[in-house]
Image: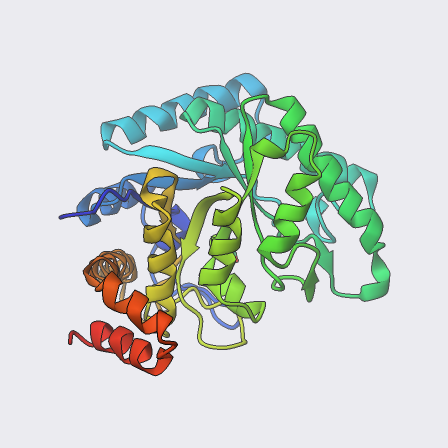
Amino acid sequence: MEKYGYRFSFGPWNIHEGADPFGPPVRPSLTFDEKLKVFNDLGFDAVQFHDDDAVPDLDDLSASEIAKQARAMRRRLEDHGLVAEFVAPRLWEHPMTIDGAFTSNDPKAREYAIERSKKAADIGRELGTNLMVLWLAREGTYMREAKDAVQATHRLLEAVNTLLEYDPQLRIAIEPKPNEPMDLAYIPTIGHALALGFQASDPSRVGALVETAHAVLAGLDPADEMSFALAFDKLWSVHLNDQNGLKFDQDRSFGSVDLRRAFNQVRVLDENRFYEKGMVGLDVKALRTQPAELATKHLRNSLHMFLRLVEVVRSLDRERINELIAARDYEELDWLILSALTGG
Ligand code: GLO
Ligand code: MG
């Protein structure tokens, strides 16, 4: 398979059992080794990890036990010819983080969140990656009056600084999302993520991850969100998927809802040589209706859609596009793009 210089990743949670808030799992779980085989079979290069995907039950383990298990995981990856792209602390499931992690009103909960994130950094080091993704799932409110948003912003900055200081190699990519699970999140867009990063003690080690669906949920265009980060060399990873309007976070296969929106994401990534900078990460879910033995096609489809769109982007007649832009003939430009997308 020609991958045009790109490397691709997804997380083990992207092969899932189909449970939703209204119904139980509909597919059996795959073991981690079965999942690794899917990475190989579909031509992926890297694995995205939550800390406890790599080291289950890490809250109950000593530092040396965590390091040992992380090293064992690294060997398993190596056996499959894979690497770890990043490790993300899972800060949204523990009872301590019910009302936020770094921004909880409870100092014990905030301390738990910091300690847990330090462990995630340790795991990353053992897995051979210095990239930490911070999806700030519960850093926000259900009730506006329940937290002080100014103070919460300072607490987020403090947490980032503490982690940067803890591990001098660590790079943090903030993954914004405007809502879900919270009603409203404190870091809803890339602008917010980068503003925080530029205030950090070492701004060169704070960047961002743009997820398609999250940008759409914020009412923004994902390609523009990516471009904003690319302009400052801050786009360190992406979570490509798709999203049908303003509703729950769907994590649909890349390009399956809005092909032109997908095209524009690939266009800005390719025009800015993202293949030299980061990995193309997916964050996609199989539809709940998908039978177990067919529940990896969303990954296949997303990767192949990305590659097809790279071909479309690279086949565009740049000179013609420049002429149309100079003539301000945007309707003809529209037709040129639509023709390319429909195989014309
Ligand atoms: C949920 C997020 C989630 C993160 C993952 C990595 O909406 O997209 O899937 O990307 O936990 O931190
Ligand atoms: Mg994501």
Find residue 119 and report its image quarter: top right
| 276 to the left or right of 87 | left
Q: Position of residue 258 (x, y in %)?
A: 37, 74
Give the quarter of the figure containing the C terminus: bottom left
Looking at the picture, tell me which residue is in the foreground, 67 or 342.
342
Where 292 falls versus 237 (above or below)?
below
Q: Residue furthest top?
A: 64
Q: Position of residue 218 (x, y in %)?
A: 58, 67
Find residue 223 and report its image quarter: bottom left
Where 151 falls versus 249 (above or below)?
above
Find residue 141 and report its image quarter: bottom right
Colour convention: rainbow
Looking at the picture, tell me which residue is in the foreground, 226 or 166.
226
Who's the residue at 24% across and 28% down the image? 79
Q: Residue furthest bottom?
A: 331
- Answer yes or no: is residue 94 visible: no
Looking at the picture, tell me which residue is in the foreground, 140 or 260.
260
Who's the residue at 26% across and 44% down the image? 44
Who's the residue at 20% across and 77% down the image? 342
| 235 to the left or right of 313 | right
- Answer yes or no: is residue 194 visible: yes
Q: Position of residue 213 (x, y in %)?
A: 48, 64
Q: Position of residue 226 (x, y in %)?
A: 47, 55
Who's the residue at 23% across and 56% down the image? 307
Q: How many marks?
A: 0
| 38 to the left or right of 2 | right
Q: Residue furthest front?
A: 327
